[in-house]
Image (spheres, helix red, strand yellow):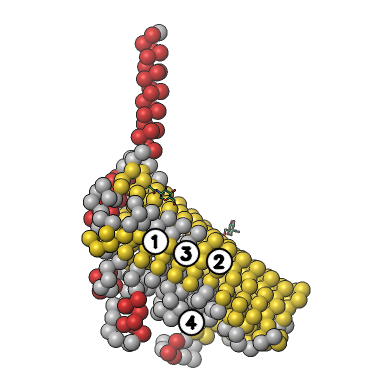
């Protein structure tokens, strides 16, 4: 009898100790040798922290204290032994000043095959300015690295992260499931080449909330194989807007389905809400998109579907886009266009756009009604629609 009691008490004690331990497995990068001086290479300390956290059978945390840490290419590889890793960043991760160090690899900081990783806070400084200058001068330069990428991963949170001056894209979500991003601040100059803010592809259940994106290419770009994407409360500009595309790059391509983009303010952007496909054969499609509650402030092409994308006339002239576009709704879109054509639906002769719905759209150009243009587009208008639909 007594023996049983003791063993119950012991096992309860054991559970409590276990839980306490689980909550306190913290890997502090400074304790592992990182130097917050912005010039000592701290990559190894971050790798050690990851190996510790990823190898832990209990949930783990990585802590990056305030300060600046020089970081070269970092691969956070899974699968891990646990599915709850918190990375709390109070400091700034700085890329090497010489853009060649990371510029020939696809990613600067990459996660792959991970489940249950959450990043809170922190700044990533990609140091991309010199590389952009090289590209703009049309010199020979490396393509540049994406600052942060998640590939083949699941249950990811990125909350309160700042990304500054990425060489190429800021953040890429590729082949992932259930990704929640919130409170991101993404900044690069308006003329920086290919600095897309967030690129999503081949991923399901991605959410992007309450974020500010100022960059030189698309604020958010949505590639093939994106499903159940939710974007809400975004300030975009400068930048090229929010784009589904480019699609039809390949013949065999997965479709884009069930995308919601709501409550976005576009300021001085090249596009507002855009769907863009190469004029090339493809099995891809776009189906079920809701663009809702947008304010356009001096946007060059507020609403645009372009199925004849063919930059530099290479590999596409005289071909038509195979992408099928259907069920696209624009609801409550207000503001100003920087060009006379505020609504342009230029669809494929082979696959006309179907089920475009315009509802309460009011876009002006220099205090006059703007103009709409349609080719091979079928749809309907509801409520006040200015410029009037051209179906
Ligand atoms: C790290 O930053 C968070 C959020 O700003 C703050 O709550 C926390 O106290 C910071 N940690 C330290 C040790 O400064
Ligand atoms: C569409 O995506 C949203 C998340 O963005 C999800 O909540 C909803 O269930 C999806 N709808 C369908 C029919 O899959």
Separation of residues labelled 1 and 3 (CA atoms):
9 Å
Q: Which residue is mark 4?
A: 278
Against 17, residue 48 (above or below) is below
Q: Residue furthest top?
A: 1
Report x, y in % for residue 45: 25, 53
Q: Which residue is mark 1?
A: 123
- First-in-chain label (2 vs 4): 2
Q: Taking 81 as reference, is 316 left or right?
A: right
Q: Which residue is mark 3?
A: 185
Residue at position x 28%, y 62% in the image: 38
Quick one: SS at disc 1?
strand
Residue at position x 50%, y 76% in the image: 238
- First-in-chain label (1 vs 3): 1
Decide if residue 254 is in sight here.
no
Separation of residues labelled 2 and 3 (CA atoms):
10 Å
Q: Residues within 10 Å of mark 3 (few under 14, many from 20)?
A: some
Against 243, residue 232 (above or below) is above
Q: Quadrant of residue 335?
A: bottom right
Q: Which mark is residue 356?
A: none
Residue at position x 29%, y 59% in the image: 69
Report x, y in % for residue 207: 52, 59
Camera-near label (2 vs 4) is 2
Report x, y in % for residue 352: 61, 81
Quick one: SS at disc 2?
strand
Q: Which residue is mark 2?
A: 234
């Amino acid at each position: 009898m007594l023996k049983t009691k003791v063993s119950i008490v012991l096992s309860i004690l054991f559970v409590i100790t276990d839980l306490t331990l689980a909550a306190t497995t913290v890997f502090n990068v400074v304790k592992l040798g990182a130097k917050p001086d912005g010039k000592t290479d701290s990559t190894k300390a971050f790798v050690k922290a990851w190996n510790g956290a990823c190898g832990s059978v209990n949930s783990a945390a990585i802590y990056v204290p305030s300060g600046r840490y020089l970081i070269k290419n970092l691969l956070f590889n899974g699968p891990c032994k646990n599915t709850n890793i918190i990375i709390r960043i109070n400091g700034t991760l700085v890329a090497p000043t010489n853009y060649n160090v990371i510029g020939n690899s696809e990613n600067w900081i990459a996660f792959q095959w991970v489940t249950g990783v959450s990043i809170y806070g922190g700044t990533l400084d990609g140091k991309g300015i010199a590389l952009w200058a090289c590209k703009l001068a049309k010199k020979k330069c490396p393509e540049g690295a994406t600052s942060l990428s998640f590939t083949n991963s699941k249950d990811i949170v990125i909350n309160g992260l700042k990304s500054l001056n990425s060489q190429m894209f800021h953040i890429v979500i590729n082949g992932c499931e259930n990704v929640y991003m919130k409170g991101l601040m993404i900044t690069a100059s308006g003329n920086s080449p290919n600095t897309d803010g967030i690129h999503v592809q081949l991923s399901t259940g991605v959410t992007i909330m309450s974020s500010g994106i100022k960059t030189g290419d698309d604020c958010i770009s949505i590639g093939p194989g994106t499903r159940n994407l939710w974007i809400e409360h975004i300030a975009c500009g400068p930048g090229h807007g929010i784009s589904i595309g480019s699609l039809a790059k390949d013949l065999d391509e997965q479709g884009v389905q069930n995308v919601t983009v709501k409550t976005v303010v576009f300021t001085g952007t090249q596009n507002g809400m855009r769907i863009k496909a190469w004029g090339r054969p493809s099995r891809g499609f776009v189906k079920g998109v809701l663009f809702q509650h947008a304010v356009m402030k001096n946007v060059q092409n507020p609403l645009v579907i372009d199925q004849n994308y063919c930059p530099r006339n290479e590999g596409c002239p005289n071909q038509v886009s195979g992408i099928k576009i259907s069920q696209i709704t624009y609801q409550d879109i207000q503001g100003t266009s920087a060009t006379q054509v505020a609504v342009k639906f230029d669809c494929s002769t082979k696959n006309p756009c179907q089920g475009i719905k315009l509802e309460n759209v009011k876009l002006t150009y220099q205090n006059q009604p703007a103009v709409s243009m349609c080719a091979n587009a079928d749809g309907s208008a509801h409520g006040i629609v200015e410029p009037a639909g051209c179906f």
